[in-house]
Image (tube, rainbow, N blue to C red):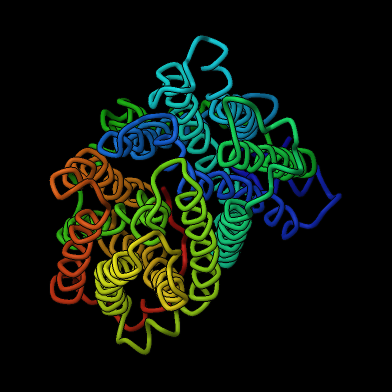
Amino acid sequence: MESPTKSSLQLETATTTNITPILKIISVASVAAGIQFGWALQLSLLTPYVQLLGVPHVWASFIWLCGPISGMVVQPIVGYYSDRCNSRLGRRKPFIITGALSVIIAVFLIGYAADLGHSFGDDITKKTRPRAVALFVIGFWVLDVANNMLQGPCRAFLGDLSAGDEGKIRMANAFFSFFMAIGNILGYAAGSYENLHKAFPFSNTEACEKFCANLKSCFFISILLLLTLTGLAMFFVEDVPLSEAKKNEDIEGTEDSSRSAGCFGEIVGALKELKKPMWILMLVTAINWIGWFPFFLFNTDWMGKEVYGGNVGDEAYDKGVRAGSLGLMINAIVLAVMSLGVEPASKIMGGAKNLWGIVNFILSGGLLSTIYITKVSEFDRHRAGHYVPPATGVRVGAMTFFAVIGIPLAINFSVPFALASVYSATSGAGQGLSLGVLNLAIVIPQMIVSTVSGQVDAWFGGGNLPAFVMGAIAAAVSGAMAIVMLPSIKKSDAAKASMVVGGGH
């Protein structure tokens, strides 16, 4: 009889020999491309789309509260119960499959919100379409919950396949980050293509014209990509079910009061045990994300309104949004390349915390550069006395902004998580819970920015620049705090602190 203490990798190797462990890791990690394709579409197209349906700019940011809320609630719950799931399909597969099916439902609601709203009585001649907005919001929240339901178990599945081998864990996370970048590139490329809807002629309807039809077409591709990658991983990679003996062993090992409260009880317990370095890291991370989230919220809207001088729904705005998607694709390429250079850059800068601090000043300068780019574009239109598209220099400046922002983004998706791993290892806290607690320092600032940024923009004329300035100030503050306040780590730990362990939403 097999010992219940065998690792999942040992059990799997004994039952499946069709493909090598490395290919299994790659197959599961590739699901990240399908997940990130959908995230890229959200970041580049959905803020303009929701305004097209009639939601004012000041309220559009509230819809983005779903991401941080679902990330804070869904991932811990799904992760906790997937650890204890004894389905015959395995621990992770039921959640991954459910997440993929939920994505299909969500994408249908989002893509067909305008059409369904019109069928239910929306007047498409009016600025606001309340039924379409309601369907969109439902679909948007379901999509974010589903994406979080997918991402957590996929990462946990990679941990199962690595079976505690540090080299394989490092490799699995590298593959996951790589496929995240691939998903970003593909998603932003699809969003920037003007005539994608021609591949799906049925997408263009009375209630859903060119921009809406392009978005709908992007989501069709998203469904196909996610289902293909998920299907291959679920078919070729066995997820060994949790045996009854192992289940009993886990239950017996978790009877103390701190664990009996479930996943949130464990997080509360982890907060109580945090040492000073982790608290400082969480504070710096929280301020840093106040700097990042305005960019994630309003990048393509800024291109459509301020750079291209359009209004929601007109041709100039649509061109600006597509140009913004192209900029985000360039951003993703820089992110992918820079991710490979995090470790050597950390050594050059004298440590991971110094590197993180320095690139936050790059983020601050980049966000402030949007003021100059916007004013030059506005001056050109004012001087011409009529609408003119942005000059070549303005477009180059905007694309340069997107490219440069990819540098700090790569560091932001790696160094804070690696520092959390080192700080938790040196303090004796659990690494997994420490990373989960760090996620609170990411999602809570996102909720704050989603709540206040639209109103801040409205106070200063309804544009996107006030939120960018707020982000620039936060980025500079977090950069200084990272360099001055974060404790240094030992030289022997530098490589570990520079290891890319991936980011979240």
In this orientation, does residue 33 appear?
yes
- Residue 34 pos. (x, y %): 63, 46
Q: Nearer the viewer, residue 491 or 251?
A: 491
**Residue 91 to residue 383: above or below:** above
Count the labels in the image: 0
Q: What is the quadrant of residue 425 in the picture?
A: bottom left
Camera-side residue: 262 or 324?
324
Q: In this view, does 189 lie to the left or right of 376?
A: right
The structure residue drawn at horizontal position 31% and vertical position 52%, both measured from the top left corner, is 293
Residue at screen point 22% across, 55% down: 282
What x and y, as percent, mark residue 155?
A: 54, 48
Q: Does residue 451 lie above or below 134 as drawn?
A: below
Residue 88: image location, x then y, percent:
69, 25
Q: Which residue is drawn at 67% across and 49% down?
A: 28
Residue at position x 51%, y 49% in the image: 315
Q: Residue at the bottom extreme?
A: 348
Look at the picture and state if 495 lies above or below 162. below
Q: Quadrant of the N terminus?
A: top right
Q: Can residue 406 be seen in this view?
A: no
Please give left or right for residue 294 compared with residue 92 in the image: left
Point out the residue furthest to the right here: 18
Q: Which of 169 and 286 is in front in this view?
A: 286
Q: Position of residue 17 (x, y in %)?
A: 84, 50
Residue at far front of view: 385
Could you tell whether 505 is left or right of 172 in the image? left
